[in-house]
Amino acid sequence: MNIRSLKLTVFAGAMLALFCVGGFAAGGKLPFTHAVSGTIVSIDANSLVVTHQKNGKPETLNFALTAATSRKGNLAVGNVVSVHYRIEKNQRLTTSIQAQPLKTPKRTPE
């Protein structure tokens, strides 16, 4: 092993250790993020309710919104959205919401 690859290995190990220590300092766990797509049932400044299909059956999910939640697109009732969230204190805490583009109906040839 030459000096350059040894330095690179030591640097990579140090960076890995740094990230692990930072994660444990933040409560012992690295945040795990979930994602779901569905239709907005209701939305206000602090909460979001989305319905989606799970195993062929409709399921309603409630999410908490914060000032840190990233919001993109037209977030209105009836629109389809992608929601990224994490579970914190038995609550779905939204990290980002993005409206999906509306599907335009296909034109039939005249």
Image: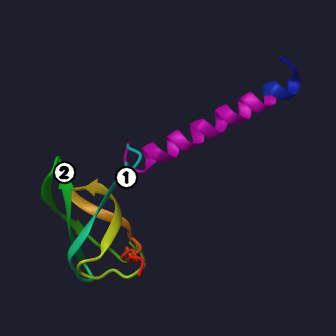
Q: Quadrant of the C terminus?
A: bottom left
Circles 2 and 1 in contact, beta carbons < 8 Å: no
Q: Quadrant of the N terminus?
A: top right
Mark 2 or mark 1, which has the lower sequence index? Answer: 1
- Give the main secondary structure of the magenta stretch: helix
Give coordinates of residue 72: x percent, y percent. Answer: 43, 76
With respect to residue 100, does 34 lie above or below? above
Question: Does residue 90 appear anywhere in the picture?
Answer: no
Most foreground residue, 26 or 88: 88
Residue under label 1, please give it: 33
Give coordinates of residue 40: x percent, y percent. Answer: 24, 73
Q: Give the CA distance from mark 2 to mark 1.
A: 19 Å
Residue at left offset 79%, top offset 25%? 6
- The kind of secondary structure element at disc 2 is strand
Disc sitting over residue 98 in the figure:
none
Give the residue type at disc 1: Thr
Disc sitting over residue 54 in the figure:
2
Q: Residue at the front extreme?
A: 110
Give coordinates of residue 16: x percent, y percent. Answer: 59, 37
Residue 84 belongs to magenta span:
no
